Image (cartoon, helix red, strand yellow):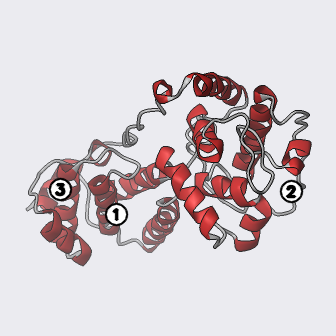
Amino acid sequence: MLVELFTATLSLGAMPTNADHSAQWTAQLASAAKQEARNPWTAAVLYCQAARHGVTEAQYRLAMLYAFGLGVPEDRAAAATLFSVAAEQGHYESQKMLETIRISAHRLPACVESNTNPAPAPLPPPIDIKLFNANQKMVAKIITKVAAWHGVDPNFALSIAKVESGLNAHAISPKSAMGVMQLIPDTAERFNVKDVFNVSQNVKGGVRYLRWLLDRYQGNVALVAASYNAGEGKVDRYRGIPPYPETRQYVKRVMVLYPYAVHQTESDHYRDINAFPDQKAARKK
């Protein structure tokens, strides 16, 4: 049986029976579950550790990540193997998933066979500026440069700008948001933008606001996008994306272009996200 092969290969016993160990794995699974929607790669790392030690629920959850390519590369063979191992130990959901994917395989992920981290899911291609017109290309180059200076992923800044204005330096919304990054007067003043129709100033103000929001929400892309649209006060009030159709649609449009739960820079990518860490922090100018 696969479970015997799994145990022999890893020289592991069954799920820990020691009460302290069981409590440890229960706490680790709970921590990983919180990370799944926010940073699935971090969840995969925790699941790999538990799966190596024979924790059946971790094997199932890791299999789900591999089955759908969440945080790790999609690998249906690895998923099927993990489902089989868990199913042979009586895990009901794993048995049902085997019926769904209908694949028989005998290949464990490397992170389960040895003490290594799983490979992260491949990044989607960046926004192709070749599809932009001449004016948009000029604006995109400015956004890319300014974003890099401020520790913001250029693709995230470009995604926000594309949804906000289509990279139109002269755009004005019915709510008086202006320029490439669609700054309202209060935000322009807050980030010392004197001329909202000056592309460099406007982009710098918008990117600085994005960086501030990324720090406030620990790199949570959905909350940052929601805050950019509706304001951080509304996000804090609802402790999540506000229930406004416009804001919810806005977040969806941004995440089509930038499909990550967590901001993809070295400083943010592996954060243990806590979206609302401390509401005592004063609003910075």
Residue at x 66%, y 69% (from the top left corner): 242
Secondary element at tag 1: helix
Specify the amino acid type for callout 2: Ala
Q: CA distance from mark 2 to mark 3?
A: 47 Å
Which residue is under mark 1? 61
Residue 81: give its label: 3
Please say if 102 is above or below 182. below
How far separated are the C-alphas under marks 1 and 3?
12 Å
Work out how far the residue at label 1 is from the one at label 2, CA to CA, in angstroms.
36 Å
Q: Quadrant of the C terminus?
A: top right
User: Which residue bears the numbered disc 2?
Assistant: 281
Would residue 25 appear left or right of 113 to someone viewing this image?
A: right
Three-letter amino acid code at disc 3? Thr
| Residue at 80% over, 33% down | 197
The image's mark for residue 123 is none
Percent across and percent down for residue 124 are: 41, 38
Q: Classify 183 as above or below 17.
A: above
Is disc 2 surrounded by few (<14), some (14 to 19) or many (20+) residues within 10 Å? few
Are there few (<14), some (14-19), or many (20+) residues within 10 Å of tag 1?
many
Q: Position of residue 3 (x, y in %)?
A: 16, 62
Nearer to me, 193 or 133: 133
Residue 22 appears in the picture as rendered:
yes
Whether the residues at callouts 2 and 3 have beta carbons within 8 Å, the answer is no
